[in-house]
Image (cartoon, rainbow, N blue to C red):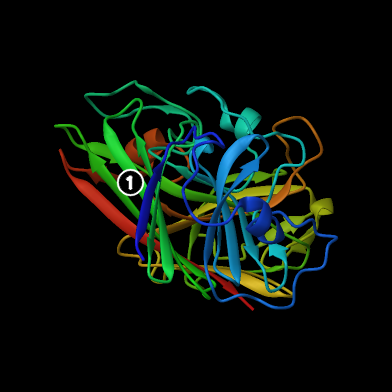
Amino acid sequence: MDDSRSIAGDMSPRHGVGFPGGCERFCPPRCHVPPSLPMPTMIRTSLTVTETIVEGLAALCVDTGPLALTVIPALGAKIASLRDTRSGREWLWRHPRLPYRRLPHGSSYVREADTGGWDECFPSVSACAYPAPPWAGAPIQDHGELWSQPAELRVERTGDGVTLEATWRGVALPYRFSRAMHLAAGSARMALTYHVASLADAPMPFIWSAHPLIAIEPAMALHVPPDARFHCELARPDGLLPARSGLPFPPPATLHGAPLNLARLPGPEAAVAIKLWSEPLAEGWARIAASDGALHLRWDVAELPQLALWLNLGNDAADGGSPYYNLGLEPCIGAQDSLAEAVMVYRRHATLAARGSKAWRLEVELEQ
């Protein structure tokens, strides 16, 4: 039976989505099991879509059997949790100190909203002045315009699958952006379909990046296409990398005079931070592997030409607390992180034609 609902980003618990069963019955065993509790050994092959409350905010939980995720519409449709229920592994990092909360447009993402999970960055990643007329000089906030606005979330059940479509509208620029997540019962895969449409009569340059922050552990294996070549946007401490462009992965990093292998993740004691973004790729995939499974991303390089990597291995915390230990595994469009630099320095970005649109697709698989 088909069932379609629309959910406002600021939905309250009294505005249910109408699916059978309450979250108290279905969601907690999949979405919010503390790591100390044993995971069930039997994995269902049916699909459930239920409501829950996460830190006072209404959320939606989808459980396909092997995969469970939680989405918070009020936080820009943040994917707050992506769990492999077969192993119990939570793949998305969660900030240990910052609470979830609504913030006004113009806020600093890194200081106030870097809570973890998976956000979308559009039309820039870092804050900048928009570089093209007729909007030249318009301020684009940190990590783009989507994370700070409630998304309308439409839920459609069809057969043994479900689609969650989040929709946003531009703030400084006139556009409509959507992300549809497609999941099926019994599947550990999720397909994300993106679409952005210009509502303007002038061309609109942009960059985009998926922004999933991965919960990592020392010695996890990070794999990217072997022919990929990267630019270095940031490297700390100084002298970590020998060059700023043309870098393979892993790059020839040295720390305190010794080689540092970034393909087998060092522990937080390394205290390094690196942001890399690639030249256009010949293959579209990236994979992070643990002892009990892997997170594998795949895409078409004709649609998504590039990949960015953000490795914060115990180097930095914008809130002033203990440094973070996480990985940004980020298929992207354009030079990262500033749209202004992408347009004026690197000349590597995409452009929406007047009243035009673009679409791209990304697949996520939890492997065993």
Name the side, left or right, on which 46 lies relative to 1: right
Q: Quadrant of residue 111?
A: top right
Q: Percent x, y for residue 172?
A: 34, 25
Above or below residue 223? Residue 347 is: above
Name the side, left or right, on which 62 lies relative to 34: left
Q: Secondary structure at mark 1?
A: loop
For the point 72% across and 44% down, the residue is: 237
Q: Which residue is mark 1?
A: 349
Q: Percent x, y for residue 156?
A: 37, 56
Residue 107 shows in this picture: yes
Give the amino acid type for the residue marked by disc 1 in the picture. Answer: His
Where is the C terminus found, in terms of image quarters?
bottom right
For the point 71% across and 34% down, the residue is: 98
Above or below residue 338? Residue 364 is: below
Name the side, left or right, on which 352 lies relative to 330: left
Where is the N terminus found, in terms of image quarters?
bottom left
For the point 34% across and 20% down, the residue is: 137
Task: Assess disc 1: are there few (<14), some (14-19) or many (≥20) residues with their C-alpha within 10 Å of its C-alpha.
Answer: many
For the point 17% across and 42% down, the residue is: 353
